[in-house]
Image (tube, rainbow, N blue to C red):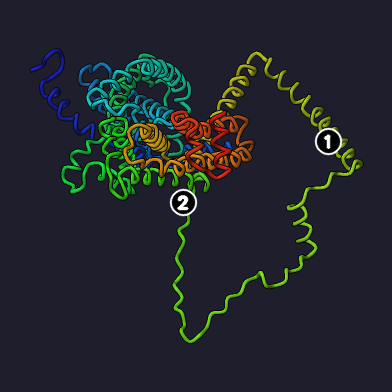
Amino acid sequence: MRITGYSFLSGLLTILAGPVLYVASIHWVLRVRQQWILKPPHLKSPPSRLCMGFSTLFSLPSLAIFFSYAWCTVVFTFFYSCLVNNLKPDSNLALLEPTKRAPHHGNERLWFLVFGNFCFAVLFALRDLVKDTNYAQWPKKTNVNFTDAVKNEIVECFSGPFWGDLAASATFTLAFTALYRTFRGVAWRWLVSYVSFSRPFVLNFAKTSRSSVSWSLGWYLFVSEIALLVILKPTLAVLDTYMTQPLNFASFTRKSPLNPEAYLLEAMKSQDPFYLDHTVMEIQRIVHAKKKRAIFFADPGKPSLTHELYRVMIIQLGRVYSTLTADGKPAKKEVPSAPVQPDMHTVTLKSGNIFKPPAKKSGIQSLVSTIVETTPRPTPAPIRDAAHVIHEKEVTLLKKAEKPVKEAEQWALGLPVIGPVLRWVKDVRGCYQNWAGNEWARRRVFNGVPEFDRFKRVVDILKTMTCASATEDQYGAVQVVLPATLEALVRVRWGAQTLQTKLLKEAPKVSDSASDGVREQIGKVTDVIDDGIRTIVDRFGTSLTSAFTFPPSVAAELTNICQG
């Protein structure tokens, strides 16, 4: 029995093959994306444009992305070709095209689709790596339920970006079809000549007269690409939404002897970054609700819930400060020395270096101390004039050397055929340099603040609780920890500025855009801190300086932030 050319058995097999297709292809993409969300990888960021591209393409996390996309696409292409060949036999997309001499000869039309979709998947994965879309996108609103969040993500998938993907897919299909038809003969002949065991399977591919790849086959390639996008994009969007959806902590606190607020503060001791992010998100949701944060202010215990909340949040700021000052490197754990057992039969004699005469400095040490500790003497005028003349001669020589190079470049750009190619290469090189500089800056700052969304939520929690304490704090618990809170924010800002100074020295080695990228990325960190400090200062006004005492450097920094 056949229904419009499609057998009932084929339809049943197609339905049964759906779960198999998912497990064999899409499941691997989701697994890799899940690992990127749970444990965001720290890609290497050497101060070199070439090394930046190499680390992006060949690091283990990147290779996992490429492999998962490629494997998913190859499996999907075989499934798609079998389905189309069954529905439309004249499409000639069978797995084999046997002959008398080669009964297991492959079908070039099928392999055209496989290679095309493989290249498309690799480019798609490369785009995700370049745009950093594999990392967790934490929701800005924590009061949206999962169903509405999924609907919003699916609608966004098929809005503007999808039409851009559609145009990119059409462009890729035309380019790949043209390139394949142009170079297929050369490529297959090389394979048959140098890979002898492939001859029984691809021998006819090397014959130009036996080519079965026409322009119409590009339509099947285009449809398979769109089908893959329609399947992958919503699936990945739903995964991201599911992984970053706020947890329901009621199911945890219900089984705990602690009250919900104390349970959250205890959960902040977790070493799992992903679980810690969800805990901070839940605390942020609570402190923005007046009735729920009143539980913190109403606790008279010692230590109170308010003190414990500020303590765990300041610890988070301390971790950010440590990674910023260490440039993302983990802090070295100090090994405590074994305690010395006192000997009761001896008497300890206390002595110090203050009783010893100062050691005489050698000539080199004296010279170094003079340079470091005293004001440097001005350079004599003859030496200064000679250096100026040498500098002018260097500039003149550089201009003379650059002039013929620029003239040759302008001449080459004006040629009818080579000119457009050179302009395209120049544009691509400029885009790559710009990307390398910005990506290098993002990675270096990411190493310093690996959990930027968590950092923003921590500052928002402290800001919200501090401002609310002006009218809601019954016991004045926040007033005790407010100076330490502002000092912690200022010190994190100093750490960010220290890292910026260090990165700006390395930025010229990468590209011209690296310096701007560093300022932009560090600016995101300092803007969060400045907003928190200004909001607190605006809420308390002049009473802040009259009621609290800060170290001079911290007070000066607070003044600069508020006046900036």
Work out whether residue 428 can be spotted: yes
Q: CB atoms at circles 1 and 2 under 8 Å apart?
A: no
Q: Sort mark 1 into few (<14), some (14-19) or many (20+) by Cα contacts within 10 Å.
A: few
- Marks 1/2: CA–CA distance: 44 Å
- Where's residue 448, x and y in %? 49, 42
Residue 479 versus residue 83: which sits nearer the camera?
A: 479
**Residue situated in front as seen by the camera: 541 or 256:** 541
Residue 142 against residue 497 in the figure, above or below: above
Residue that mark 2 sits on: 330
Numbered disc 1: secondary structure: helix
Q: Return the residue at label 1.
A: 391
Front residue of this view, candidates 139 and 541: 541
Residue at horizontal 45 percent and vertical 44 percent from the top:
484
What residue is drawn where x is 43% and y is 28%?
A: 127
Which quadrant of the figure contains the C terminus?
A: top right
Outermost residue to the bottom? 345
Which x, y percent locates residue 396? 84, 30
Is the residue marked by circle 2 packed among few (<14), some (14-19), or many (20+) residues within 10 Å?
few
The residue at the far left in this view is: 1
Labelled disc at residue 151: none
Q: Secondary structure at mark 2?
A: loop
Rendering quarter of residue 185 = top left
Expressed as whole percent of the image width and height from the top left, the position of residue 61 reads 40, 41
The residue mark sitting in front, 1 or 2, is 2
Question: Looking at the image, can residue 98 be seen?
Answer: no
Q: Quadrant of the N terminus?
A: top left
Q: Earlier in the sequence, mark 1 or mark 2?
A: 2
Question: Which residue corresponds to the image point at 81% horizontal and 31% vertical from the top-left?
Answer: 395
Compared to residue 136, the image places residue 182 above or below, namely above
Left or right of 81? Residue 377 is right
